[in-house]
Amino acid sequence: MMTKPVEAAAAPAPAIDVRFGQVGLIQVRIRSTDPGAILDELTGRVASAPLFFQRTGVCLDLTVLGREPQVEEMRPVMDAVRRAGMLPVGLVGESAAMESLSAALELPVLAPFRGQAQAAVPVVQPAERAESGLPALMQHQPVRSGQRVYARSRDLVVTATVGAGAEAIADGCVHVYGSLRGRAVAGARGDTGARVFCQEFRAELVSVAGVFRVFETLPPELAGKPVQAWLDGDDLRFAPLGG
């Protein structure tokens, strides 16, 4: 009598995957350890764009403080950041003392980013121009919510749309020949000469070399129009294309 073979039990699916990924984080540049002043300023920033800043992860940049802060100073600073509605997830600094501070605060030390942010919170990065000679990265499919397209060391050309919650990022210029409803980041490695161009301006965020503005502070009169954005010193400016 033939017996039916016993099928091997299926291996259980793994509980986790560990992968390396690119995560964009806002950096709060700490110039003072006065928790009251920090709370007042951050509360104003969060109120100006609550959907963007509320409960967002931020790094605390200590490189411009001018001294090594003590653990006892930093705990009230972190509490002020949390009370403002942001979540500290790391420190930025390059000194040996930073390691002991990070251990005491149970926060990782992250490499400093490049650029300088405005109308939100500052970001620190040394300028780095995109390499010349590389053709633009062409994106012919819509960039959908949750997707990110990054053109390293060159321009990015999107011939379709950039949906809400999507990101179009380039070390050079970003060109969107459709509706820009998500985020456009030009000069991602500090190229202050980079620009953002789009045919239909409805962006959630626009950034050039780290200087960025969120949708609550973008010019409402430009909504739905062809627009370009560029840096003028430390100001991020917008104008109609051809205007």
Image (spheres, rainbow, N blue to C red):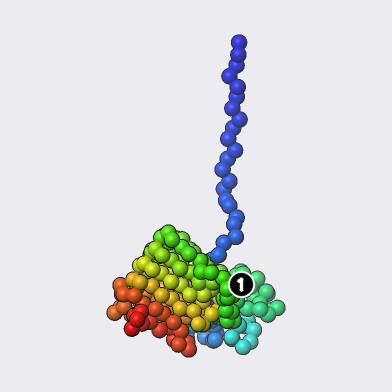
Residue tagged 1: 110
| Residue 187: image location, x then y, percent | 51, 76
Question: Residue 119's image quarter?
Answer: bottom left
Q: Nearer the viewer, residue 33 or 160?
A: 160
Count of numbered circles in the view:
1
- Label 1 CA crowd tier, 10 Å (few <14, some 14–19, many 20+): some
Q: In the image, 138: left or right of 113?
A: left
Please tell me whether mark 1 sits on a helix, a strand or a loop.
strand
- Which residue lies at the image location 41% right of the left edge and 75% below the top edge? 197
| Residue 27: image location, x then y, percent | 52, 76
For this orientation, the residue located farthest to the top is 1
- Which residue lies at the image location 54% right of the left edge and 72% below the top edge? 154
Q: Nearer the viewer, residue 26 or 161?
A: 161
Question: Residue 145's image quarter?
Answer: bottom left
Question: Residue 99's image quarter?
Answer: bottom right
- Which residue lies at the image location 34% right of the left edge and 75% below the top edge? 226
Against 162, residue 171 (above or below) is below
Q: Amino acid at mark 1?
A: Leu
| Residue 186: image location, x then y, percent | 48, 75
Quadrant where the N terminus is found in the figure: top right
Q: In the image, 70: left or right of 137?
A: right
For this orientation, the residue located farthest to the right is 96
- Which residue lies at the image location 48% right of the left edge and 89% below the top edge? 233
Q: Nearer the viewer, residue 74 or 23?
A: 23
Asked if residue 158 shows in the view, the reply is yes
Q: Nearer the viewer, residue 15 or 189?
A: 189
| Residue 135: image location, x then y, percent | 53, 69
Quadrant where the C terminus is found in the figure: bottom left
Asked if residue 52 shows in the view, the reply is no
